Amino acid sequence: MFQGTLTTKESVPKQKSTRSRGILRIALEVIFMVAILADLFWYVGVGSLYNALLHIKVEYLLLAFLMYFGINLLFTVRLRRVLSKNGVKTSFGKTLLAQYGGMLTSDVTPDVQVTSLHQFICLTKKFQHQRVYRAC
C-alpha cells in the first residue's frame, strides 16, 4: 500500500544525469572524429594535401558536385516511384534524406568482391531467392 508522500529527492527525475551522459557521448564522438581526421592528415601528409588543393580545377570539382547531387535526385525520384507502387507515401525530402543516408552507408560498408563468373551467379541466385543453391 501507499504510505505517505514522496520526499523531494525521490520525486525529482534524474534528467541531469541523462543530459550529462549525452553531452559526454557527443564530446567523445567529436574527440574520436578529430583524432581520425588528424591521423588521416598525418598519413597523407599536410604538405601534399595542401599542394593538391592549390592545383585543383574548381570547374571540375563543381561539376562533380553537380553530378553527385543530380544522380541522388534521380535516385530519389526512382525510390519514391517504387515506394508509391508498394503503397508507401513519403515526402520528397524524407526520401532524399534516406537516399543520402544509403549512399553514405554504402561508402563505409565493405563491398562484396566477385572474382569469377561462378561467384557472380551464386551471389545473384542467393540474393534473388534468399537461399543458397547446392551447386554454389
Image: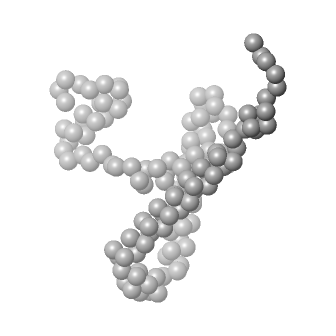
Q: Position of residue 122 (x, y in %)?
A: 24, 33
**Up/down of 14 relative to 42, above or below:** above
**Up/down of 84 relative to 47, above or below:** above
Q: Quadrant of the N terminus?
A: top right
Q: How many marks?
A: 0
Q: Position of residue 79 (x, y in %)?
A: 56, 41
Q: Quadrant of the C terminus?
A: top left
Q: Position of residue 82 (x, y in %)?
A: 56, 36
Question: Which quarter of the figure has residue 43?
Answer: bottom left
Residue 29 appears in the rendering = yes
Q: Position of residue 37 (x, y in %)?
A: 44, 69
**Up/down of 74 relative to 119, above or below:** below
- Closer to us: 12 or 6: 6
Q: Is residue 92 left or right of residue 46?
A: right
- Closer to us: 46 or 133: 46
Question: Which quarter of the figure has residue 66?
Answer: bottom right
Residue 76 appears in the rendering = no
